[in-house]
Structure formats: structure tokens, C-alpha cells
Image (cartoon, grey):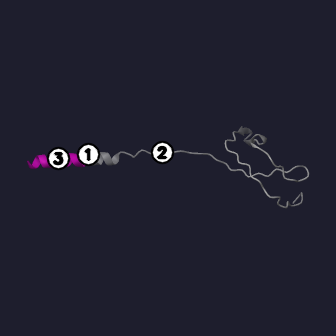
Amino acid sequence: MRLVGCLLSAVALIGSALIAQQPSPAFRAAVDVVALNVSVLDAERRYVRDLDQSDFGVFEDGVKQDLTFFTPSATTDCPLPPVGQ
């Protein structure tokens, strides 16, 4: 009887050890996001407004990248430094 109790205890310990060794499921994700804040000026150094996503192109190592998220924002007319500074 004592042998049966020891065997059952051993089986229970081995079973719990096997369960503890199994890794829990993991979810991994990666997102490459590059935020670019740009201001566009005309030849007279005035802000150009009402631009949309199709007015921009972003290139990395000469390869055009997809723009998947675009948010225009209104800027107040901030004073700009003189050309050459």
C-alpha cells in the first residue's frame, strides 16, 4: 500500500512538473511607425495650407514608402527666421 502511495505521489509530481514547463502562449507584434512633422512654405515663405496625403512622398534609401496614416493639422502663422539662418 505504501508503494502505491509513493507511486501516485511521484506521478503527481512529474505531471505537475511537465505542466509547469510548458510555455504559456505569447502574442508578439511589431509596428514600424515613423512620425514626421512637416511645414510647407511657398516661394514667398508663406505657409501652404490644404495639403493632403497625395501631396507628400516619403522615401527611404531611394525607395518610396507607403503612407498609411496621414493627419493634417492647422498651424498658426509662426514667425519664421530670415533665410540663411
Image quadrant for the C terminus? bottom right
Q: Residues within 10 Å of mark 2 (few under 14, many from 20)?
A: few
In the image, taking residue 40 as reference, residue 18 lies left or right, namely left
In the image, taking residue 19 as reference, residue 65 lies left or right, namely right
Label 2 vs label 3, nearer the camera: 2
Q: Which residue is mark 1?
A: 15
In the image, what residue type sits under mark 3? Leu
Residue at (76%, 40%) from the top-left corner?
54
Residue 56: image x %, image y %? 77, 42
Residue at (11%, 47%) from the top-left corner?
3
Assign a secondary structure to mark 2: loop
Q: How many marks?
A: 3
The range drawn in magenta is: 1-15
**Which residue is farthest left?**
1
Q: Earlier in the sequence, mark 3 or mark 1?
A: 3
Residue 60 lies, with reference to residue 80, above or below; the image says above
In the image, what residue type sits under mark 2? Phe
The label number, if any, that marks residue 46 in the structure image: none
Residue at (21%, 45%) from the top-left corner?
11
Instruction: Say if mark 2 contacts mark 3, CB within 8 Å.
Output: no
Q: Earlier in the sequence, mark 2 or mark 3?
A: 3
Residue at (30%, 45%) from the top-left corner?
18
Q: Main secondary structure of the magenta part?
A: helix
Alpha carbon separation for disc pair 2 and 3 = 36 Å
Q: Which residue is mark 2?
A: 27
In the image, what residue type sits under mark 1? Gly
Residue 84: image x %, image y %? 89, 58
Assign a secondary structure to mark 1: helix
Assign a secondary structure to mark 3: helix
Q: Nearer the viewer, residue 31 or 3?
A: 31
Q: Which residue is mark 3?
A: 8
